[in-house]
Amino acid sequence: MEKIRFFDTTLRDGEQSPGCSMSADEKLSLAKQLERLGVDTIEAGFAASSPGDFESVREISQKIHGSRVVSLCRASKNDIDSAINALSEANNWGIHTFISTSELHMKHKLQMEPKDVKSMAVTAVERAKKATESVEFSPEDATRSDPKFLVEILSETVRAGATILNIPDTVGYTTPEEMFELILRLRNEVYNADKVTFSVHCHNDLGLAVANSLAAIKAGARQIECTINGIGERAGNASLEELVMALKTRQEYYGFESDIDTEQLFPSSKLLSQITGVDVQPNKAVVGANAFAHEAGIHQHGVLKNALTYEIMTPQSVGIKSSNLVMGKHSGRFALGERIKDMGFDLNDIDLNNIFVEFKKLADLKKQVFDEDIEALVTHGVGKQKDKYILEDLIVTSGTAAIPTATIVMKIDGKIFKKASFGDGPVDAALNTIKKITGIQCKLTSYVVKAITGGTDAQGEVSVGVEKDGMRITGRGAHTDIVVASALAFLNALNRIVIRSKGLSPATPVKKSALGGV
Ligand code: MN
């Protein structure tokens, strides 16, 4: 059976989506998960875009061994050289270079003549080829380019040494039938087309990214560029998990295999959501909260008798575990540690001790502690001791006849601070007090609270969107008291701002988008 290669661009195109910027550490942990998932190629970033991105591409390429690591580059000497410098010490790497080929882009964005665009592409591919065997070329906005010109420029880049020709639907404009025709035509007309790999990079502006990618495969493409949870510029990229499961569930129709370990799909989706603070919608295919929930009685009845009646794939096959193990206040540190290990987390002793303390507090508040609760403890608790801002105590008064007031005791860099303030509600009062203590001025752009499990004693998980100096950050916190959860979420956002502002990858999404990409 022939293989479809998965090229993941979560760390490059995905990171360009609003609110999805990641620090260098976060990128590395996601890259390691992508390696476990079995993607063939990881586009780790855009080395020339900032010193932070350069460092991050370099680090990822040296620590990842199971996947090829590439950097995106414009078709310029500077971009190519900076990618080569970042990657050349890795053992499996490649260069991905691009230039716009649509009349619209050449005229208004590049302000260049087609013949000059062609020669720039050739020069870039030749330069990259001197340093690495694996050179991918993308004619940006290919689906709105003149196919005749595409044939010319792609043929020239193949002569110059390109091994992968990637056809981007940069603005998500094409349809499955057109994509099929285009790939077929290019495979027929491009010089030595049978010696190179055709790839596609589809955007989801019309909700067709996955369908267009599948059409391209039908026409002979053998590499698909995609992202976890389908994140990316605007409406995002083709979603990796949907493509993988479409090819697997309908293998008798498509007839391809891949190196993806499907049981790592859900953990990858979860990890990305935890890092970015951006959840997938509940009805998201494959990894959404409702993807395997059967509500209608008649469906439930059918599924219980034979899962195949309404289930085309199992939750287990995508890595959703259906464990009912419940822990309580009598569970010990060892049992908690084992449970956390089973859930796939690898904690050091300091984190485990801290989480055990939080677990005991939670077990006192709540009769039963579910997997979801433990997961929240781990997500919100790991690395907490390194945080700049730590909540020590919170007292609020509120109600129909009171002016909402919050008194907060906080630790900042180990020193204790205490202040009180008012608000138009208990959450507002708590957040105002934190702003007063930290002196940080920022805008709250979103506030969402949801119950982690069922029952009135459930923990509330709060996510807040915070904007400061153009940086958009999400913070999360969980507690059985939603005012405390809100304060924790806000402090989490402030701590993330601190990491971002001194981290290697401050990644201002606006600036990156200005650089472009395919
Ligand atoms: Mn793109």
Image: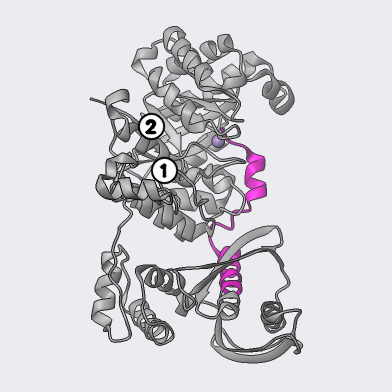
- Report how far apart the C-alphas of labels 2 and 1 lie in the structure: 10 Å
Element assignment for label 2: loop
Pick whichever of labels 2 and 1 is earlier in the sequence: 1
The spot of residue 84 in percent (x, y) is 45, 39
Residue at the spot of label 2: 132
Q: Is residue 480 left or right of residue 256?
A: right
- Residue 226 visible in image: yes
The spot of residue 407 in percent (x, y) is 66, 90
Q: Residue at x 53, y 15 (%)?
A: 153
Q: Crowding near pointer 2: few (<14 within 10 Å), some, many (20+)?
A: some
- Residue 200 visible in image: no
Three-letter amino acid code of the residue under disc 1:
Leu
Instruction: Report the front residue among 263 and 150.
Output: 263
Q: Residue at x 43, y 51 (%)?
A: 295
Q: Is residue 212 above or below residue 358?
A: above
Magenta portion: prevailing SS class: helix
Three-letter amino acid code of the residue under disc 2:
Thr
Instruction: Report the front residue among 299 and 124.
Output: 299
**Circles 2, 1 touching at the beta carbon (< 8 Å):** yes
Res 52 label: none
The residue segment tinted magenta is 489-518
Q: Residue at x 64, y 43 (%)?
A: 513
What scheme was used to colour the molecule? one colour
Element assignment for label 1: helix
Residue at the spot of label 1: 87
